[in-house]
Image (tube, rainbow, N blue to C red):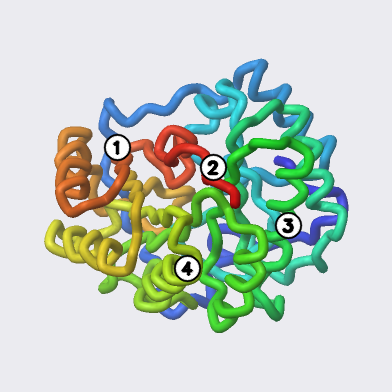
């Protein structure tokens, strides 16, 4: 893991989920994993080398914190999604393996360290995400902007995508900061269908996430907007279609669809495994709805091959 030495401890698994409003049925088993659902082995020399480099900069990657199934592929390609503002989240989402607790104060030196790591890794496209920081007045918007600015100063011409939390109740201030340092792509994941929100995203709001995307599009119409949806949590096809329609209606340009995978027996069980041909069908449906780009597949995640989904370099006035 790439924890900074000063990171506080957080709760995981059953301890993390003990106080959520809809209890997880941890006794319910997920269906057997199908043979076509296989990720690349992450235990390669390239992965180990990148982990050591990130540890040297005291940085977190969501690739590791969230147990992403593509860590082997992405690290081998020399790419990573950086998770700023520490490794402790103020939310207790039962699909996610990031630790919950009281976060440490923001590290003012983190933007510089992030920029140094991006330069050393010779990246031309970087994704910056974060834990939820409901303890901060702006939800972390100013820190996102500082990281974007530091990365662009260190690597001229780099493209920067942000994958933000919902900034619950702090949207106006957070987006005001981002408007001062516009990303090349703005991503906020809707995650699941409206009916399942209370069970899957306690503390979040379906309409609020849609409103954030729409607000961003109004504020920065030239910045492509993006969102992601997990399948296999108990949604039906009509609900997936409705969610895709809602995203388009609120100005979302790019969408990713992937299979939910259970991080541990304490987390939400998988209701079904969606086969690759069904994901391909959803890709076609989403494109017909008007999305500019769509990535869909069992192992697709919101940052997977993000550079390939993004449009060309943003024109700077």
Q: Is residue 221 left or right of residue 112?
A: left
Residue shown at the point (47%, 68%) measured from the top left: 216
Location of the N terminus by quadrant is top right
The residue beneath circle 3 is 86
Whole-number angstrom distance, CA of label 2 to CA of label 4: 29 Å
Rendered location of residue 96, percent (x, y) = 50, 56
The disc, 3 or 1, on the residue closer to the chain's N-terminal end is: 3
- Crowdedness near tag 2: few (<14), some (14–19) or many (≥20) residues, C-alpha within 10 Å: some
Rendered location of residue 254, percent (x, y) = 35, 50
The disc, 2 or 4, on the residue closer to the chain's N-terminal end is: 2
Q: Are marks 3 and 2 in contact (CB under 8 Å)?
A: no
Whole-number angstrom distance, CA of label 2 to CA of label 1: 17 Å
The residue beneath circle 1 is 297
The disc, 4 or 1, on the residue closer to the chain's N-terminal end is: 4
- Crowdedness near tag 4: few (<14), some (14–19) or many (≥20) residues, C-alpha within 10 Å: many
Q: Is residue 143 left or right of residue 39?
A: right
- Crowdedness near tag 1: few (<14), some (14–19) or many (≥20) residues, C-alpha within 10 Å: many
The residue beneath circle 4 is 216
- Comparing marks 4 and 1, which lies closer to the viewer? 4
- Comparing marks 2 and 1, which lies closer to the viewer? 1
Residue shown at the point (39%, 67%) measured from the top left: 200
Residue shown at the point (30%, 63%) measured from the top left: 247
- Crowdedness near tag 3: few (<14), some (14–19) or many (≥20) residues, C-alpha within 10 Å: many
The residue beneath circle 2 is 67
Residue furthest bottom as drawn: 169
- Comparing marks 3 and 2, which lies closer to the viewer? 3
Between 95 and 114, the one lying in front of the other is 114
Whole-number angstrom distance, CA of label 3 to CA of label 1: 29 Å
SS at mark 1 in the image: strand
Using the rendered image of the protein, determine whether residue 201 is visible from the camera's viewpoint.
Answer: no
């Amino acid at each position: 893991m790439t924890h900074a030495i000063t990171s506080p401890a957080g709760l995981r698994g059953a301890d993390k989920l003990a106080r959520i409003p809809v209890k997880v049925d941890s006794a319910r088993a997920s269906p057997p994993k199908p043979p076509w659902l296989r990720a690349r082995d992450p235990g390669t020399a390239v992965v180990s080398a990148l982990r050591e480099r990130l540890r040297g900069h005291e940085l977190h990657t969501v690739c590791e914190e969230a147990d992403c199934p593509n860590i082997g592929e992405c690290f081998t390609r020399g790419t990573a999604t950086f998770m700023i503002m520490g490794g402790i989240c103020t939310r207790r989402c039962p699909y996610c393996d990031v630790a919950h607790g009281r976060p440490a104060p923001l590290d003012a030196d983190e933007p510089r360290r992030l920029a140094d790591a991006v330069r050393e890794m010779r990246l031309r496209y970087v994704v910056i995400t974060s834990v939820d920081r409901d303890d901060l007045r702006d939800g972390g918007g100013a820190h996102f902007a500082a990281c974007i600015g530091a990365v662009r100063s260190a690597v001229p011409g780099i493209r920067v995508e942000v994958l933000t939390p919902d900034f619950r109740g702090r949207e106006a201030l957070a987006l005001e900061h981002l408007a001062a340092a516009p990303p090349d792509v703005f991503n906020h994941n809707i995650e699941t269908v409206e009916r399942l929100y209370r069970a899957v995203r306690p503390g979040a709001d379906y309409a609020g996430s849609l409103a954030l995307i729409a607000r961003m599009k109004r504020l920065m119409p030239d910045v492509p907007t993006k969102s992601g949806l997990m399948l296999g949590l108990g949604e039906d096809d009509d609900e997936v279609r409705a969610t895709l329609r809602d995203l388009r209606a609120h100005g979302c340009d790019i969408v990713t669809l992937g299979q939910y995978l259970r991080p541990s027996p304490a987390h939400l069980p998988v209701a079904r495994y969606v086969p690759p041909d069904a994901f391909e069908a959803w890709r076609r449906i989403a494109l017909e709805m008007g999305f500019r780009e769509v990535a869909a597949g069992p192992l697709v995640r919101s940052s997977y091959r993000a550079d390939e989904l993004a449009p060309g370099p943003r024109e700077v006035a």
